[in-house]
Amino acid sequence: MLFTKRKDSRPIISKTPFLVYAGKDFLQNLKKIGFKTFDNWWSESYDAYDGVARIQKILRVVDKLSKYSIEQLNAMQKEMLPVLEHNYELIKTLSPQDMLDRLK
């Protein structure tokens, strides 16, 4: 598994939603591999940016989420369960080569 020894795999393995501060198009590449992301719950427009602009976009998402009640966050996480489970099952089955092949 390409991600299992990296910190970016931890949320997938622990079935936790995530925002990613990484290189531009990281989420787009995750989707090419077959992972699902969280664009149904918050804007992932930050993926088209890098550097300071990416941080600013991510902070807007975090700020918006910070205003949700515990009940709203719990309901959101419950809605996300199929995506979280999909990603968990996928990361268990893909080899590093499989992931690289899907990026081509």
Image (spheres, helix red, strand yellow):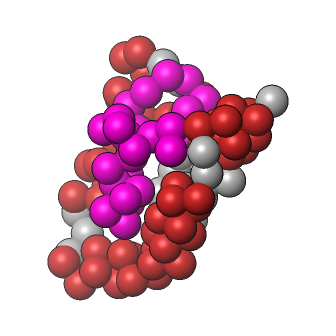
Judged left or right of residue 13, residue 68 is left
**Quarter of the rendering occupied by the C terminus:** top right
Q: Magenta region, mostly helix, strand or loop? A: loop
Front residue of 49 and 96: 96
| Residue beneath the point at 19% across and 77% down | 70
Residue found farthest to the top: 51
Residue 5: in sight, yes or no? yes
Closer-to-camera residue (64/34): 34
The residue segment tinted magenta is 1-27
Relative to residue 24, is residue 76 depicted above or below? below
Q: In the rendering, at what x and y percent does residue 75 appear?
A: 35, 84
Residue at image x 47%, y 64%? 88
Q: Residue 79: x and y, percent?
A: 46, 81
Q: Give the image location of residue 9, x and y in percent.
A: 39, 46
**Rendered residue at 35%/27% (across/down):** 55
Left or right: residue 92 compared with residue 61: right
Is residue 9 depicted above or below 39 in this figure?
Answer: above
* Residue closest to the eye, 30 or 44: 30
Residue 78 appears in which quarter of the rendering?
A: bottom left
Q: Position of residue 37 (x, y in %)?
A: 55, 56
Q: Quadrant of residue 72?
A: bottom left
- Residue 86 on the magenta segment: no
Q: Of residues 29 and 52, which is closer to you in this image?
A: 29
